Amino acid sequence: MTLTAQQRLDDPLALEAADPSGMLRQVASAAADIRTALRAVTETDLGPVVSAGRPRAVVACGMGGSGIAGEVLAAVCGPRCAAQVITVHDYQLPGWVGAADLVLAVSSSGAAEETLAVAAEAARRGCPMAAVGDPGSPLAVLAEHARAPFIPIERAGRLRASLWGLSVPLLVIAERLGLAEVTEAGFESAAAILERVSHLCRPDSESFVNPAKSIALDLDGTLPMIWGTSALAGVAASRFASQLNEDAKYPAVHGVLPEAHHNQVVTFDGRFAPWPASGPVNYAEEQPRPPVPLRLVILADSQEQPQVARRREASAELAGQRGIEVTELAAEGDQPLERLASLVQLTDYAAVYLGIASGLDPGPVAVIGDLKDRIA
């Protein structure tokens, strides 16, 4: 018997069988990852980077699931940060980076060739540096040779489920340099939010009361356009799109307001909108309905700028006029890390559930391995 998407999510035996890689368990471990990473960074001597004082800029380097740790750092530090925080997802450092700048190299495996190249270049330029990754890896060896602090994070599952373990060390370093306000109590508060969301989204909770399952079913068969309403929510939007790509093997577009109103919004009048702004139409046989309708997903930050709040409301109205369904998710908490955690945890669950609802194993990413083989 062929199961429907909802049956795949609400049948406990079918749900467990559909997740042989244990992605749901890995998402549920997010709070534990924060606490484990805090212990690891506490046991590491950060003196070589902290004693140098506040840097001119912080350059966070990493790729894929490791690279987003730098985006988290920039979002939590915020626009009023006393030093510029930038991310590098490439083989090279910007030409201006030098001894006045702190380089943070992040690689869960410790073997990403791009990150190793950047870390080696930072060492040659005499940049203060710290690294995060797998103990005993090439990155750990490189950090040792450069006399740079190395925070060991042992990955228990898939890289894309290691966000918090890789991000926490960067946030602790930023806090000690006076660039971020994240206390130990703040980390624990974020962990508590992750646990609360995990309870709401647990596998044995049926779709009509499980927010993540409901989101997955709403997205199934649509083209999600995911907008954040602040730089912080924009990181969550980017993360959600990436998780949909990897966990559900599903395309998604992400953006952030107000920038998305200068480009992406125009797709509301394109072929993926169910009908034009003038209202519903009766499609003739030669003019079929859109094969994959747009769905607007808004990740709303409680600290959004007032004009952006107006843009968010207008976005929903414009989409509704064109028959585009809208899903709006609101961040919870007062502090940046809390708000980011609430959005990321909910959407991480939703991405796994969409993969399962689609009849796919959310774990493997075989094509990435195929690509690496081709370019090795």
Image (tube, helix red, strand yellow):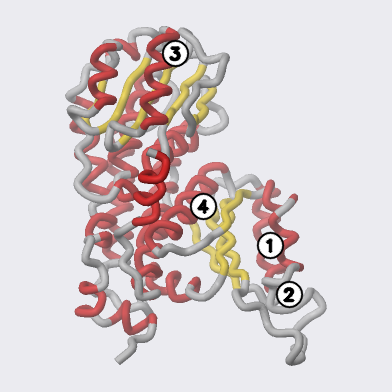
For badge 3, the amino acid type reads Arg
Secondary structure type for disc 3: loop
* Vertical relation: 292 (above or below) 27: below
- Circles 3, 4 touching at the beta carbon (< 8 Å): no
Bin the neighbour count of mark 3 within 10 Å (Cα to Cα): few under 14, some 14-19, many 20 and up: some
Secondary structure type for disc 4: helix
Expressed as whole percent of the image width and height from the top left, the position of residue 348 reads 38, 57
- Quarter of the figure with residue 247: bottom left
- What is the CA distance from the residue labelled 3 to the residue labelled 1? 40 Å
- What is the CA distance from the residue labelled 2 to the residue labelled 3? 50 Å
Expressed as whole percent of the image width and height from the top left, the position of residue 55 reads 46, 14
Foreground label between 3 and 4: 4
Reading the image, the residue beneath label 1 is 315
Reading the image, the residue beneath label 4 is 237
Horizontal relation, residue 78 to residue 53: left or right: right
Horizontal relation, residue 116 to residue 293: left or right: left
Sequence-wise, which precedes: disc 2 or disc 3? 3
Foreground label between 1 and 4: 4
Horizontal relation, residue 276 to residue 164: left or right: right
* Nearer to us in this view, 45 or 270: 270
Sequence-wise, which precedes: disc 1 or disc 4? 4
Sequence-wise, which precedes: disc 1 or disc 2? 1
Report the residue at 74% width, 68% height from top: 270
Numbered-mark total: 4
- Quarter of the figure with residue 198: bottom left
> Which numbered marker is on residue 321?
2
* Nearer to us in this view, 123 or 260: 123
